[in-house]
Amino acid sequence: MSRELIDLAIERLREDFPSKSRSWVRRALVRFMKNTVKEYGENVWVVKGLTELGDKYPTYVVRFKDGRYYCSCFESSWGLRRKSEVCTHIAAVILYRNYKKLDSEVYASVINIECVDYYLEIPSELRGKVKVVKSVRVIDATDKLNPRHRVTYVIYANEPMEVRARLTCDGEVRELSLKLVRTRRYMIELLTH
Ligand SMILES: [Zn+2]
């Protein structure tokens, strides 16, 4: 497992549950690092119990249904109290899924430009197939109404392909042919966060 990926997976977990405590995150991380999460089927995971974290059962089953996670620990004697919470079995599953997603392969191309006005156009027939994310940073705000930006575009898809794009930077239009090459999802996160 890569440290960088784990850090990003934790960051996403924190963003999704900003009110959760440090110890909640830490317990989820312990479960994840001890490799206790196994995918059992579509939207079903089995999480091995850890006595050091107070688990009474050898395994817990986490399911994702109708946009919500459910854990078998909800059905235990503490179930009523726990039902409204997101237990750390679920948090470990979310970490596991975040990690897997970040580790997955995508095909991407990166464009870096510096302009006041900018626009990237991808052919409409590729919409849904090709995704574009960008990160924008002001690098010169001398002219307050027209600050200059450094813009990073990442164009990516699930399969290798060549994408024609039209890039407009301060009125200058360029036709580009972008070759999407294999990389991993977390590289996109690093470039655009
Ligand atoms: Zn649970």
Image: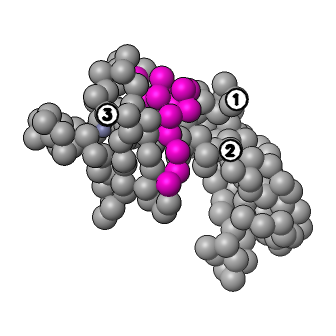
Q: How packed is label 2: few (under 14 Cα within 10 Å), some, or many (20 or more)? A: some
Image location (x, y in percent) of residue 98:
54, 43
State the separation of the CA atoms marked 3 and 2.
30 Å
Q: Say the numbered circle drawn on residue 39.
A: none
State the separation of the CA atoms marked 1 and 3.
30 Å
SS category of the residue bearing label 3: loop
Q: Nearer the viewer, residue 170 or 190?
A: 190
Q: Say the numbered circle drawn on residue 2.
A: 1
Amino acid type, callout 2? Asp
Q: How packed is label 3: few (under 14 Cα within 10 Å), some, or many (20 or more)? A: few
SS category of the residue bearing label 1: loop
Rendering quarter of residue 27:
top left
Amino acid type, callout 3? Tyr
Q: Is residue 67 above or below residue 69?
A: below
State the residue position of label 2: 103
Q: Which residue does the image show at 19% across and 45% down from the upper left?
A: 75
Q: Which residue does the image show at 74% across and 47% down from the upper left?
A: 184
Q: Nearer the viewer, residue 193 or 99?
A: 99
Q: Which residues are magenta?
A: 27-40
The reply to whether discs 1 and 3 touch (Cβ–Cβ < 8 Å) is no
The reply to whether discs 1 and 2 touch (Cβ–Cβ < 8 Å) is yes
